[in-house]
Image: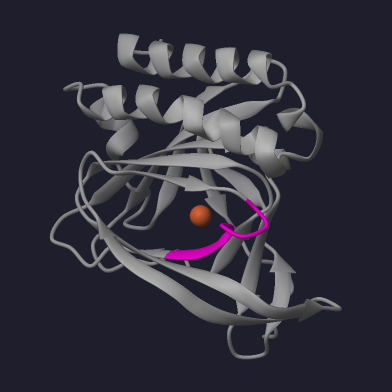
Amino acid sequence: MLTPALQALVAAVEEALGTHPEALETGTGAAAGRVCDEVVPAMEALLATPDAVPAPSRLALGGAAVGNLLHADGAGRFHVLAVVFPEGTSSGVHRHGCWGVIGYLQGGDEETRYRAAKEDGGRAELVEASRHVWHQGDVTVLLPPDEAWHRVRNPGPGTGVSVHVLCRNPADHPHSYWDRATGSVLPFPFVEVAPGRWRAEVSGLPS
Ligand SMILES: [Fe+2]
């Protein structure tokens, strides 16, 4: 059962996608950008609402980062996660292949964005483009191809929780990992590691 604030967020995403159906084709580009812009106010309203995300959805899993599923669209157009980073944990450098809106609910997250100086044949050269510490109430947007590569790290204190509205369903969300050591771009699919609890797991790393 969604809280009223989450219901309002979901309704805003549904309305934005209804207005800009072309955003569903690639999940990138101008139409996807307009969807993000129209979701931002609803995300801001959610972040300003106490208890918008129930306490169990703000828990890590086994002391590690996890995405707790709050809502999955019945038509597979988007989903909403509460992403939890315990203090000192990091996502690694990764890319979202279609649009997303992130709202910071609790704690602090340092986000580094990267641009691909070069990418071909499953390898990339990434350069740091920006670094920002986000706080409760802040909202950012993911919009490939330019705003897609990033790394999130929780420098503490406390557990960081952010609400992610991401394109497609968790199992279909296009997600890639950058292996800094080799420059390889690897699949980084969301995997349901416990009921309703998702974690991105990199595949193909050299052992
Ligand atoms: Fe991410």
Q: Is residue 65 left or right of residue 166?
A: left
Q: Nearer the viewer, residue 11 or 162?
A: 11
Residue 189 picture location, percent across and down: 67, 53
Give the quarter of the figure containing the N terminus.
top left
Q: Nearer the viewer, residue 57 or 95?
A: 95
- For the point 59% across and 38% down, the residue is 33
- For the point 50% across and 64% down, the residue is 150
192 w.r.t. 88: above or below = above
Query: Quick check: is 150 in the magenta stretch?
Result: yes
Q: Which residues are magenta?
A: 144-151
**Whether residue 133 can be seen here:** yes
13 w.r.t. 160: above or below = above
Colouring mode (rainbow / by chain / secondary structure / one colour): one colour
**Whether residue 53 can be seen here:** no
Residue 185 picture location, percent across and down: 72, 73
Residue 143 picture location, percent across and down: 59, 48
80 w.r.t. 192: above or below = above
Magenta highlight: main SS: loop
Q: Is residue 34 left or right of residue 63?
A: right
Q: Nearer the viewer, residue 31 or 87?
A: 31
141 w.r.t. 76: above or below = below
Query: Number of numbered discs present?
Result: 0
- For the point 65% across and 75% down, the residue is 116
Give the quarter of the figure containing the C terminus.
bottom right
